[in-house]
Amino acid sequence: MDRLAKMRNSRPDSSKERLIYFKDPDTTTEQSEIKKTNWTPRMLFKTFPTRESRQTTAQRKPYGPTTEEVTQWAQSLDNLLSSKYGLIAFRLFTKSEHCEENIEFWLACEEFRKIRSRSKLRSKAKTIFEEFVKAESPKEINLDFNTKESLHQSLLIPTQSSFKAAQNRVHFLMEHNSYPRFLDSELYHKLCRIAAGEQ
């Protein structure tokens, strides 16, 4: 029994072994234990993605139009203009053909119709007229003489429908000119292939 007790007493303390194993020659035992505690979580964090990050990745939505969306663009100009990606694509196309003044005028009219303040209506109407309607304006659109005169007179007391006739005219021009060319363009066909996952 005495021999067995001596063997037990002579067995090294396992906790001291761990302290010695992690001990830095230039640090205290307490600092070594802190190193041991912090090291393992950092390595695990780098090695395994957290549950939250996996959920975020799974819930991430793809960017760009869907196949159904690009198909609807070919059904009508209104479908194209009401689509976020469709509008972006159409504006890029018209800019590449140097005929972006029509879509920009149409968009300016859409914003104009939302204005409620009379002073803002008057200011915005003047800006639109000078930029798109006035003769030799930077982005002059193709309007007949009577429509231009009507718009010029409406600048005195503009209403939300002041540009309605001109906007409808521009919509007609786009529908029969730039819109068909857009559907036949490489840009549109490429977007169709991307939406279908072919590129």
Image (spheres, helix red, strand yellow):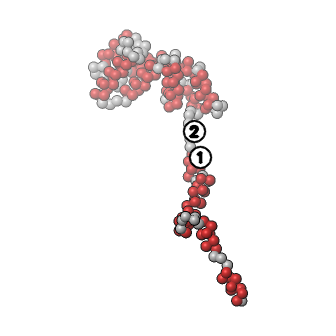
Up/down of 132 relative to 30, above or below = above
Up/down of 105 relative to 4, above or below = above
| Residue identifier under label 1 | 58
Quadrant location of the C terminus in the rendered image = top right
Q: With 192 as the anchor, is 114 left or right in this view?
A: left
Quadrant location of the N terminus in the rendered image = bottom right
Tell me where residue 137 sits by quadrant: top left
- Residue plotted at (56% across, 18% down): 181
The answer to whether residue 78 of the structure is visible from this angle is no
**Numbered circles on residues, count:** 2
Percent coordinates x, y for residue 22 in the rendering: 60, 65
- Residue plotted at (43% across, 25% down): 107
Residue toward you, 15 or 146: 15
Callout 1, which amino acid? Answer: Ala
Residue pushed farthest front?
Answer: 26
- Residue plotted at (60% across, 56% down): 43
Q: With 178 as the anchor, is 126 left or right in this view?
A: left
Percent coordinates x, y for residue 147 in the rendering: 37, 14
Percent coordinates x, y for residue 152 in the rendering: 32, 16
* CB atoms of marks 1 and 2 within 8 Å: no
Q: With 167 as the anchor, is 192 left or right in this view?
A: right
Mark-to-mark CA distance, 1 and 2: 11 Å
| Residue identifier under label 2 | 62
Q: Secondary structure at mark 1?
A: helix
Callout 2, which amino acid? Answer: Pro
